[in-house]
Amino acid sequence: MSFLTPLFLSLAALAAPILILYMLKLRRREQEVSSTFLWRMVIRDREANSPWQKLRRNILLLLQLLLLALLVVALARPFIPVQVVASGQVTVLLDASASMNATDVSPSRFESAKAIARGLANDLLDQGSMTIILVAPKPRVLVSSSNDKLELINAINNAQPSVGSGDWATAFALATGANGNAINPTTVIISDGGIPENAPPLNGEVRYVPIGNQSANLGISTLSLRPGADGPQIFASITNYGDADSAVILTLKLNGDLFNAQELNVAAGKTSNVILNGYKDTQIVEAQLSAPAGAARVDYFPTDDKAWAVYNPPQAGRVLFISAKGNLYIEQVLASLPGITPFRVPADAPLPNDPFDLYIYEGVITNTLPSKNLLLVNPPVNNLFEVSGVFTPTTTSSISVVSDPLMSFVDFNNVHILRARDVKTPAWAKTMISVEGKPLLFAGTLDRRRVAVITFDLRDSDLPLQVMYPILMSNLLEWLTPSSVISTSGIIRPGDSVSIRPKEGEQAAGIVRPDNQLFVAQAGGQYVTFADTDVLGVYGVGTANLQDTKFVGFFAVNLFDSRESNIRPLEKLTIGRTQVSAATREQTGQREFWQYLALAALVVLLVEWWVYHRGSLLPSPQRLSRK
């Protein structure tokens, strides 16, 4: 055992004054007496007034000396060397993503991760320092480069998990900045492994402490409302992320009223889909999973057992379709979407003078385009982007779909394309779907208007025959004709920003979260941007003062992230090009235990108080032998 502040051991010299005080006698005042019978008492008083006396057995003395010893040793900060995961300059990435709410580790993965982080802080070298970064949808630094163990532990104790996906790219950037130019910095990742495969490298040594030991989870992976002829169509997907088949009851509520409940048997690693037609005035759908009666369903992650979907009708429904030969696939989609009134003109006819909310060009394009939102299908050469001919994808080429809200629930694995335009994605757009590095669909904002481009003729593919074709077109049309209240593309996850269009004449909007917390967001131009979406559920949007409870729109925030719902812990991480296995205790740290000595001193103080009121002398050996 060693001491960090051995100078405080010199305070042990205070034991001498305590002993002296117990050996001193109090001087008594002289008192005249009326009888010589009391002379013996006077002699005793004179003996008692001598300055010193023999030290007697006294419990209070022993307790006070023990109390002094405990306090002196605690102030000297004793420690013992221990084997630790990391020491020196340490940066801790504490995973606070949704999957850390899993309960396969009692009481939860996050609480277990906090206990490990506290151990790292407590075992930190005296000349070392620690930075703690909480990895949530919006990562933040809890403590920066501190060696104050109390400050570090308090920050860890106050940390809370989120219900969204961790932004590891930002967290890694913060860790790189925290490591700075330090010599041999160490980054410790305390996580269950839900880190993207393309995670950037970190400077210094990387250590990984895995959390969790189970994978059983059944969750709602998709819930959406799609426009239908007789009312909105409800589409729900339930995925079994565990290793065993499981039965579950899916309950659906429409506008708060029970609509349907059915039992599903979902195979391990598979997904079951449910498609139902709702009421015409359906606006909010709530889905919930529960265990069948009498069945034991093991689910360690209840966060994804609930989901919500909201249908906001388009802003306006006037869509003009311009084509040389017409396209039945596009015309059928436009006719099936409620709230949209499609019009069609030949390619060689002049555009009507009446304004439209969306213009769709199929196989043709003009040099002068309307200043409204555009959807271009199979575009020829134009002045918006470069078109250099036609290419034919090979049959073995795989089609890539980026992770973007506009591509929600879109799967191109079974789509085959005969030919497509060889287009270069312009700087103002983002490629959504590509094959062989060439775009099949891209979208962006150009001159304050939204533009989406499909680079192939739908008739040259089997896309219109796929189940997800109406989903793709619905996503595109919803983005190109945004709602009158909410402007969003696809699903909203915790931490995402939402654009809200205030009512006519309003410069702000009021938002009520699912936890009934009220926010007022000011407009920055045409839209209000709201980013406090860190609670799952349905958000109500109204006027800024919200004098009445009537909302003018809603939007839903859901998890819908397979990386979080798949709670199977990983044994290895890929950081940059390096695989990082579970860390072992290879470095030396310092474990202090002054806290326990201080606690023992408090107990001794309480015992001393009790003894003071009950008597302080120890029985002599003779008295003990007589008994």
Image (cartoon, rainbow, N blue to C red):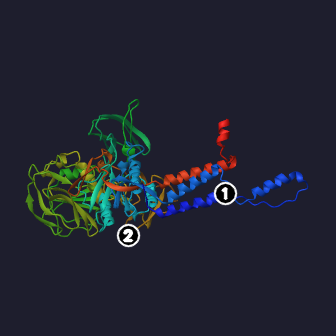
Mark found first going from the N terminus, 2 or 1: 1
Residue depicted at x 86% and y 52%: 38
Q: Local crowd at mark 1 within 10 Å, few (<14), some, or many (≥20)?
A: some
Q: Amino acid at mark 2?
A: Gly
Q: Nearer the viewer, residue 625 or 563?
A: 625
Quarter of the image for residue 529 reads bottom left
Which of the two discs, 2 and 1, sits closer to the camera? 1
What percent of the width, then of the height, locates residue 217?
33, 41
Q: Nearer the viewer, residue 99 or 354?
A: 99
**Which residue, given by chain and number where applicable, does mark 1 sit on?**
23
Q: Local crowd at mark 2 within 10 Å, few (<14), some, or many (≥20)?
A: few
Q: Secondary structure at mark 1?
A: helix
Q: CA distance from mark 2 to mark 1?
A: 85 Å
Q: Amino acid at mark 1?
A: Met
Quarter of the image for residue 406 reads bottom left
What percent of the width, then of the height, locates residue 622?
66, 40
What percent of the width, then of the height, locates residue 49?
75, 59
**Which residue, given by chain and number where applicable, does mark 2 sit on?**
525
Q: Is residue 298 visible?
A: yes
